[in-house]
Image: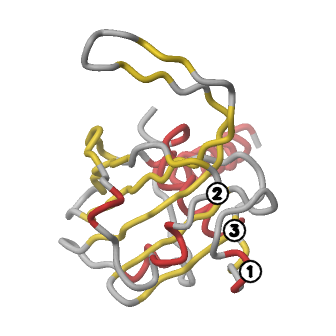
Amino acid sequence: MRNFLLIIFLSFAFSVLAQNDSVVIPNNSILKTIKVGDSLTYYQCHVEEAVQQLSTASGQTLTGNPQKYTITEKFVVKKNADSYTVNYYASSLTVFPNRKFSGLKIREKAYWEFKKERSFVLSDKDLKYLIALEKKGKEAIEYDYAITKYNTNQLIIRNGKNFKQLVIDGKYVLSKLLGK
């Protein structure tokens, strides 16, 4: 009886460990469509309250009043043989509301001025965040394309002409979740 219980306990423990060690990507996830060497681009636009500071060429620093600004970020997720790598880019702040997302279906524009901030390897936890946000988001409709006070957090996932544009309820921001 003791050995039987020990075997059941060990079987359960190993099954739990096996589930935690690998991430299962759902069939309906856009992540499932990419092959080794391919990449997905995640664009996220969200609104943050901030105080903007400007430094002039003469050395003077000017500080504005707190305002709402939109921040647009880009994550290029590349699938490797045994992992995913991410190149993270951010654009300069733009006064609220941001009209960038209405054009993302067509193509990224040079004046968006994305600047590479860092690169990192996705952990299993990071991969779970990407899957969860894709599940949590609701498909955007025409009224959602411009960022307004009513839909202040959007995510576009692109792989060539295949894309999803999602409105994300809550303050789920990829740059605050991934690579930590």
Total residue callouts: 3
Q: Residues within 10 Å of mark 3 (few under 14, many from 20)?
A: many
Which residue has dot 3 on it?
167
Near-viewer residue (90 or 23):
90
Which residue has dot 2 on it?
97
Q: Which quadrant: the N terminus?
A: top right
Q: Residue at x 77, y 51 (%)?
A: 170
Badges 2 and 3: C-beta atoms under 8 Å apart?
A: no
Which residue has dot 1 on it?
143
CA gap, disc 3 and disc 1: 11 Å
> Which numbered disc flags the more N-terminal residue, 2 or 3?
2
In terms of secondary structure, where does tag 1 sit? helix
Badges 2 and 1: C-beta atoms under 8 Å apart?
A: no
Near-viewer residue (124 or 12):
124
Q: In the rendering, at what x and y percent does residue 139 appear?
A: 69, 80
Does residue 156 appear left or right of residue 35 in this picture? Answer: right
Near-viewer residue (49 or 20):
49
Q: Residue at x 54, y 80 (%)?
A: 164
Q: Nearer the viewer, mark 2 or mark 3?
A: 2
> Which numbered disc flags the more N-terminal residue, 3 or 1?
1
Q: Residue at x 66, y 48 (%)?
A: 172
Q: Nearer the viewer, mark 2 or mark 1?
A: 2
Does residue 169 appear left or right of residue 111 in this picture? Answer: right
The amino acid pointed to by label 3 is Val
Seen as rendered, the residue at the extreme right is: 150
Seen as rendered, the residue at the extreme front is: 58
